[in-house]
Image: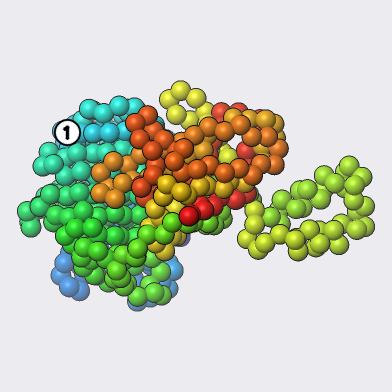
Amino acid sequence: MKPEHWESIIAKHLDGVATIDEVADLSAAIEADESVRLLYLRMARVHAALAPSPTGAGRVVSLAEEQPFWRTGWMKAAALFVVGFAVFTMLWSGGDSLAVIKDVNGAVRWTRIDGKTRYFDSAGASVSAGTIESMTPDSSATLTFADGSTVIASGPFNLMISKDKGKLLSLRKGVLFASVVPQAPSQPMRLNTTTAELTVLGTRFELIANQAQTKLSVNEGRVGLQRVSDDTSVEVQAGYQTEALFTTEAPLQVTAIPNPARTWTADLEHDVDHGRWVPVESLLRIELGLDIEAGLVQEKNAREVYAERLSNVPDGSGAIFAEPVRNQRETLYFSSLSAKRNALRPILLSAEARFRIQGKVGLPSEIVIGVTAANPERLTPGRFSVERQVEGDFDIEVPVHELHTATQRAVGFELLSWFCFTTQREATLAITGVELIGN
């Protein structure tokens, strides 16, 4: 597109009146085109100079009083990452090492600001400013900084790192565990998500983020959190948690971290991290169409048959169909569910517990069933799995003590996510239910 086009979009964005689609297009252009990045930086500087905040803090002022929240809130959240990427571009120091990859599970890719990429499948590499992201939903990466601070990102995740008077991180999505040594008050660690900005001086905490929410749990020390949508701030101390939503309808509250649960029933529609959710209404229509073609149901009776079948399934039923992901070696057909994003309590994997998995495959297949989980100290996240042979409609149970890595089992760990995959495209793997059954 011509520069005149981007000038118009950037101007609308800075004034808080760009549409969601325009912001998405602008974000993609900034990531892909250096000229657009430079244009954005130039116009942002001018905008900041002409429209200082009432508090004198130098923040760009949007037309908040004149715009409905759903628009201004989205603009502010989107701006955090649009500006963040531009800032990373300015701060990139040509490849200076910021952290070392201490551990890797699964497939992880690092992309420098200049676009050069590298895949990691082992520890030891140094990384400079750029983006670290999971290539498969079961991946994780552990980063260690020069001062001994450690950050663990678990997939699906997208984490940008840089420095500017201290460590600067932006978590677009994923689960992040951080153990941060005491930082100088003038150089705190700053961590941004789409909905919140965090300031860290020295602590251990857990962060879960996506476009709509940020959940913070503090294990040691304290963390300051500011909600992007309305600038409301709280300080979260050890043993407490808070959640910053995209909307301001709910107050920003700090509550005690609850005791862990030992059971979990997945909400397939809302917990899905990877895979294609299809509600039961659509599945029944497809099934009914096939039955009509086969002569099993007369078309004149279709409405009655559909209503009867729908009445026999629970509300919210459906299936997650596995979708492809590519690691360095092969294509996997993957479904994954977050056990953290919507859970009210941490979920502990006990020795007596077992997973019940319901689903369907189009032909006899070998599937891998697994979890990502972390120990209570958040120091050793793991990917635990087991293989099973399934065919047709299946309903199987997998004891937690059978889920393992090469060196340990999942017992005693906290559940982060559940996943299932196959290498067989023709299997058409669909998951219709996942449940953790306790004692």
Mark 1 residue element: loop
Q: Residue 203 placed where, x, y %?
A: 17, 55
Q: Is residue 364 above or below residue 231?
A: above
Which residue in the protein does label 1 denote? 97
Task: Answer whether residue 29 is visible to the viewer in this image.
Answer: no
Residue 263: x %, y % from top left = 47, 57
Q: Given the current orientation, which residue lies at the most extreme top position?
A: 329
Q: Is residue 386 above or below residue 354?
A: above
Note whether 43 is above or below 107 in the view shown: below
The residue under the point 27% across, 47% down is: 378
Quadrant location of residue 13? bottom left
Q: Quadrant of the N terminus?
A: top left
Residue 90, by quadrant, is top left
Direction from residue 335 to residue 289 in the image, left or right: right
From the top left corner, tell me how far across and down residue 345 is, in percent: 39, 62
At 18% across and 62% down in the image, what residue appears? 222
Residue type, label 1: Ser
Side of 382 where 306 appears, left or right: right
Identify which residue is drawn at 41% across, 72% down.
69
- Tell me where residue 299 appears, x and y as whole percent: 91, 53
Give the left or right position of residue 317, taking residue 124 as reference: right
